[in-house]
Image: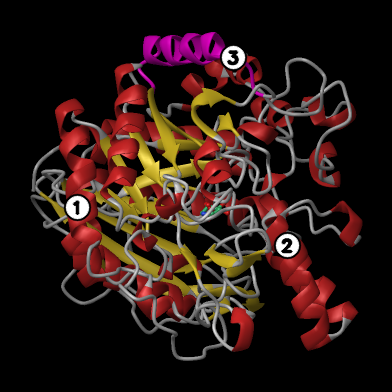
């Protein structure tokens, strides 16, 4: 396995709209981010992935781009952006942009032209098709959108339908048309020439649709997905993107819904053939059914372990994993995998330990580093996300109002999008104005300022773990082995490499759980590196772990 900068780095995700507002309009902005660069450097992160900063009418808050080469004026100017990149680079922090190329906004000039007439030169940038049935009033196929309902929208003026796998304001780009790829390559060059270091590639594995766009087998969600996830031209498209990316040695992480290890191995390699790495989602689906967050179930540690074993071992030595608990598309992890009421801080620290002691590149989502919990809003009027609103309408039909609201409060994306809780003043120090999305009430107790002051806080624990990981390659390059695959309470694993051996034990339960030293391991060789309790045993041995207790031991490799 090759040593690489991105394997040793810790990434941080900023959702700009909610990070920090500098001008009192209630919306986060670039100057707000600039004001927090010292905070980010102090946390110890090496790279930042920015959710979209481009011009957008905000149907999906930036994931509907109307101009790929412009900064959203709500966030600032191109000069602000350039300054931010310069300042981040000055601190040794790399910049990763979000690349949203499966679709554009319906306000993008390509689409504005395309929809104007059947003969428009841009028509074929998108999927316009005749409908089925008498008068063509039935959509061209039965595909459903990720945001509920048909994936097609009828256009009265040209009497055809267009495809949108997400919101109707997000028409899908047609990669059968080679001009589309040429346009995208130009966009890549534009940002790479500005000095950005790479891209997080939004729903990248949806780019290749099966020719003829056949109807799919009916399913609980995403009907038709066998014809648009990991389609047969995927590698060809990634290869084309890579022609540009390679010139700049750019890092890429591909968001890959429902991806399997086999597919990931085809797309990723340490030589950046296609993508550097992918985001897979199995490990964050241990509290839902079929990978669908709107169908929550009680967290199941065995599901998590199976996912970890599959991915940790599946990619090891061949490719490279990403590690994450949170992003802007899911509820906060505290409250899902651990309680947000009992032993909250221990739970958040335990999850920090797991994140930073596995094989892969860790990504921390804004606010996670000080243990932010979900807002769990109870009034549908407070929700802003298109996915939340559309899911709610469906859930209400299926389960009734009360249950629908409960499910939404558990899983909605707005949970992770509420403004960052900087302090306990009004609006959590995020804005002096009216925040675009309500601040979560937990800001009085859970906020960055308070966490900075308290040496025992989740924030300080994250800082410590980040430092440990960056100072010791055993955390980065070790091979993973699940030591207790059958335990329903403990997640215990070994990481082994030429840099030494680590044993990490985590009690995912609120009850005491006994850890017994597995056969063949000499506990005497291991010493305590860190723990989320002040008095964990100094030597590895049989021990009873307390609620959410998490302990890291290390052996230098000689005697273990
Ligand atoms: C994935 C993004 O992470 C999500 O926020 C967005 O809604 C969809 N892709 C569509 O771009």
Bounds of the magenta span?
75-93
Which mark is in front, 2 or 1? 2
Q: Residue furthest front?
A: 119
Q: Position of residue 294 (x, y in %)?
A: 65, 74
Give the quarter of the image for residue 72. Answer: top right
- Determine the residue positioned at 58% across, 35% down: 459
- Of residues 40 and 472, the one nearer the viewer is 40
| Residue 479 visible at all | no
Q: Secondary structure at mark 2?
A: helix
Q: Are marks 2 and 3 in contact (CB under 8 Å)?
A: no
> Alpha carbon of mark 2 to alpha carbon of mark 1: how far?
39 Å
Residue 33 highlighted magenta (yes or no): no
- Determine the residue positioned at 81% across, 28% down: 26
Q: Secondary structure at mark 3?
A: loop
- Reading the image, the residue beneath label 1 is 478
Q: Residues within 10 Å of mark 1 (few under 14, many from 20)?
A: many
Predominant SS along the magenta part: helix
Q: Secondary structure at mark 1?
A: loop
- Determine the residue positioned at 82% across, 40% down: 439
Q: Which mark is residue 77?
A: 3
Q: Position of residue 31 (x, y in %)?
A: 63, 14
Give the quarter of the image for residue 307. Answer: bottom left
Q: Residues within 10 Å of mark 3 (few under 14, many from 20)?
A: some
Up-down relation of residue 278 to residue 428 (above or below): below
Asked if ligand 1 lies within 8 A of label 1, the reply is no
| Residue 287 visible at all | yes
Which mark is in front, 2 or 3? 3
First in sequence, mark 2 or 3: give its number: 3
Q: Which mark is residue 388?
A: 2
């Amino acid at each position: 396995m090759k040593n690489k900068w991105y394997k040793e780095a810790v990434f941080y995700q900023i959702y700009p709209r909610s990070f920090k507002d500098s001008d009192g309009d209630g919306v986060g902005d670039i100057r707000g981010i600039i004001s927090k660069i010292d905070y980010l450097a102090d946390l110890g992160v090496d790279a930042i992935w920015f959710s979209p900063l481009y011009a957008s009418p905000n149907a999906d808050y930036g994931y509907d781009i109307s101009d790929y080469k412009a900064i959203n004026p709500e966030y600032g100017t191109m000069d602000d952006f350039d300054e931010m990149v310069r300042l981040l680079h000055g601190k040794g922090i790399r910049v990763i942009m979000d690349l949203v190329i499966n679709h554009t906004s319906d306000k993008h000039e390509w689409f504005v032209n395309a929809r104007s007439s059947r003969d428009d030169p841009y028509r074929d940038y998108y999927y316009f098709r005749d409908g089925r049935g008498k008068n063509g009033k039935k959509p061209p196929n039965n595909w459903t959108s990720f945001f509920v309902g048909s994936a097609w929208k009828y256009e009265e003026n040209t009497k055809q339908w267009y495809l949108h796998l997400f919101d109707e304001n997000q028409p899908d780009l047609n990669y059968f048309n080679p001009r589309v790829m040429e346009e995208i390559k130009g966009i890549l060059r534009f940002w790479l020439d500005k000095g950005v270091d790479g891209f997080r590639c939004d729903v990248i594995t949806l780019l290749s649709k099966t020719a003829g766009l056949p109807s799919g087998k009916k399913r609980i969600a995403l009907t038709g997905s066998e014809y648009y996830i990991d389609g047969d031209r995927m590698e060809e498209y990634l290869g084309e993107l890579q022609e540009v990316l390679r010139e700049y040695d750019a890092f890429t992480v591909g968001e890959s819904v429902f991806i399997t290890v086999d597919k990931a191995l085809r797309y990723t390699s340490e030589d950046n053939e296609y993508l550097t790495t992918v985001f897979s989602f199995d490990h964050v689906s241990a509290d839902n059914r079929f990978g669908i967050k709107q169908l929550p179930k009680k967290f199941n540690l065995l599901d998590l372990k199976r996912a970890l074993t599959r991915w940790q071992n599946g990619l090891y030595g061949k490719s490279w994993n990403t590690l994450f608990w949170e992003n802007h598309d899911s509820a906060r992890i505290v409250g899902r995998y651990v309680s947000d009421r009992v032993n909250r801080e221990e739970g958040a620290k335990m999850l920090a330990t797991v994140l930073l002691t596995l094989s892969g590149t860790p990504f921390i989502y804004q606010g996670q580093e000080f243990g932010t919990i979900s807002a769990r809003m109870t009034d549908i009027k407070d929700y802003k996300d298109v996915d939340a609103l559309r899911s709610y309408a469906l859930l209400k039909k299926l389960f009734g109002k009360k249950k629908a609201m409960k499910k939404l409060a558990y899983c909605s994306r707005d949970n992770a999008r509420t403004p960052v809780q900087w302090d306990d003043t009004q609006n959590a120090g995020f804005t002096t104005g009216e925040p675009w999305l309500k601040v979560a009430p937990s800001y009085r107790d859970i906020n960055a300022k308070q966490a900075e002051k308290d040496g025992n806080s989740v924030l300080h624990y994250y800082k410590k773990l980040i430092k440990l990981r960056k100072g010791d390659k055993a955390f980065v390059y070790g091979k993973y082995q699940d030591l207790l695959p059958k335990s329903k309470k403990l997640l215990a694993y070994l990481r082994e490499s030429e840099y030494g051996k680590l044993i990490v034990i985590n009690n995912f339960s609120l009850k005491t759980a006994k850890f017994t030293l597995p056969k063949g391991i000499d506990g005497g060789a291991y010493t305590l590196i860190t723990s989320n309790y002040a008095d964990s045993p100094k030597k590895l041995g049989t021990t009873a772990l307390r609620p959410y207790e998490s302990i890291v031991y290390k052996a230098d490799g000689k005697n273990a």
